[in-house]
Amino acid sequence: MAEQIPLEYRIFLTGPFNTGMKFDYSHLSNDYDKIRRKLLKKSRQNNSDKSQFYIERFKDTPGKQKQWLQSTDSIAPKELIFSDSQGKMQRDISLISCSVSCSVFPNSAKFDKIRPYFSEEPVLEQINLQFHEIGIGVFYGYLNIKLAKPVPISGNQYKNFTKILRDSFILAPGLQAIIKEKDAIVSKAASKILTRKERHNNIIDIDKIYPEETPGAPLWGHAVVILDKDYDGELPFGEQTKNLLVVSHPDGIIDMNNLSRGFVHIGWGMSLAVNIHPSEFKDLENTMVQLEFYWRAAQILNDLIMKYLEKSSKMKKFSLDQIKKSLNEIERLTVESELFYSYHMDYIKMLSPLSHFIYQETAISWRINQMLEYFDNKKDSLSKLHQQGEARIKESIDQKRDKMSNRLNVLLSILALLTLFSWAADSIGFLDATLSLLPQLKSVLIGGKFFVIIITPLMVLGIFFLFFRLTKAMKEIEA
């Protein structure tokens, strides 16, 4: 067997992009299908012969999509049966998708470095776009490769060749123009569905997390080289296989022994699929596209929670309003992340056995599981901040209550003293008036005035002592 790449083969290209269509999970939790129907109806107004918006689970059954559009959330037709083995859950694998027939040529500045190898310039003739929650989109398509001469495997030459080819399409003006155009359509449709408050109230807002990134531009790409070569349990290129891609972990080889005797070698930025059945590659395609979404979502959640932690660490003095705002943000982020985990687990649960195996191996290779673990650790730290914030609010409330209690005590004391002095003044005035009328009672009335003068300060001291004991007793009860 000649250890060289064949002159003709295919490449599957996929990657994420930011979209202006922003729905938090909580926006969708109650009216998921209702929102998608509105989104599809508005977006389909821009359908053409070369561009079609659709719902992923109805991709190959337009009649069922039409039926779904006419149905309601409460009454779904009994004959509405989904034949797709993946995505049989409350939520589809994307909110809305778009298929575009096109001719996207590579970025010349990049492609010129490898142009001599080709007998025919590769072209992306169809691009599929998926628009997901929290502002994430994923694109994918196929390239037919026709070489004039083989690319050497040794010395990482083929690895570098594929990287340049991949990036020449990621940076292609035609690809970016298509994504931006379709994203603008979906974003406009979504903005009409959301209320004004919801449009500006996203907790997971990519614009705030990555202010330098613009919607509609690919963020990175992953290329899967698809080769038809014999496979007998050994790597087809022997020790040279390691020069084809960056292997993320030693167990990244998936043996596709279901329908064929091929394998998939999962890498970082590039993967290798050798001699696998078309239906097996369909499972690989669907799973890897979905994993691009989950990788990006895990990255966004990690970066968002890190921003909250950094913001908290930079604050030297917290005001009560700041604490309340932070607590609200933490609670909302907790809800959104729990919904993300819930739908993520739902997706994994509904995968076919082969797709599940591909998912697990790729998630390990791309460190998705680790990223979710990092997020959980950061969420624990955020929970501690939440507890500290609640304690700070309670402390502030207690302090205000103490101040109010003290002020009330002072006020009551003043009122009591005023009442007491008023009583003393009235009593002395009464005794003086009586003395002028009844001078024969002079000794008794003078004794009464003396009693009032002596008893008044004693009553003042008694009032202060009473309020002191009451305040102390209240604090002891609350403690």
Image: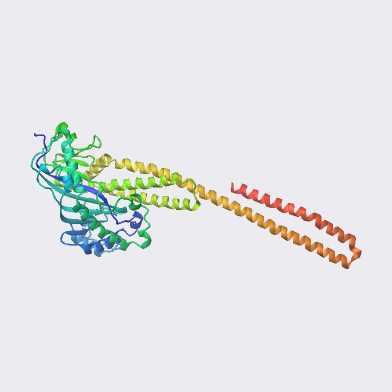
Q: Is residue 17 above or below residue 374?
A: below
Q: Residue furthest bottom?
A: 437
Q: Nearer the viewer, residue 383 or 145?
A: 145
Q: Position of residue 178 (x, y in %)?
A: 21, 55
| Figure colour scheme | rainbow
Q: Nearer the viewer, residue 42 or 369?
A: 42
- In the image, taking residue 136 as reference, residue 456 lies left or right, namely right
Q: Is residue 259 among what the camera can see?
A: no
Q: Residue furthest right?
A: 440
- In the image, taking residue 344 as reference, residue 54 lies left or right, namely left
Q: Position of residue 473 (x, y in %)?
A: 64, 49
Q: Is residue 58 among what the camera can see?
A: yes
Q: Which residue shows up at 22% across the image and 62% down it?
A: 44
- In the image, taking residue 460 as reference, residue 80 lies left or right, namely left
Q: Nearer the viewer, residue 433 or 451?
A: 433
Q: Where, quadrant-wise, is the N terminus in this rendering?
A: top left
Q: Position of residue 10 (x, y in %)?
A: 13, 45
Q: Nearer the viewer, residue 396 or 212?
A: 212
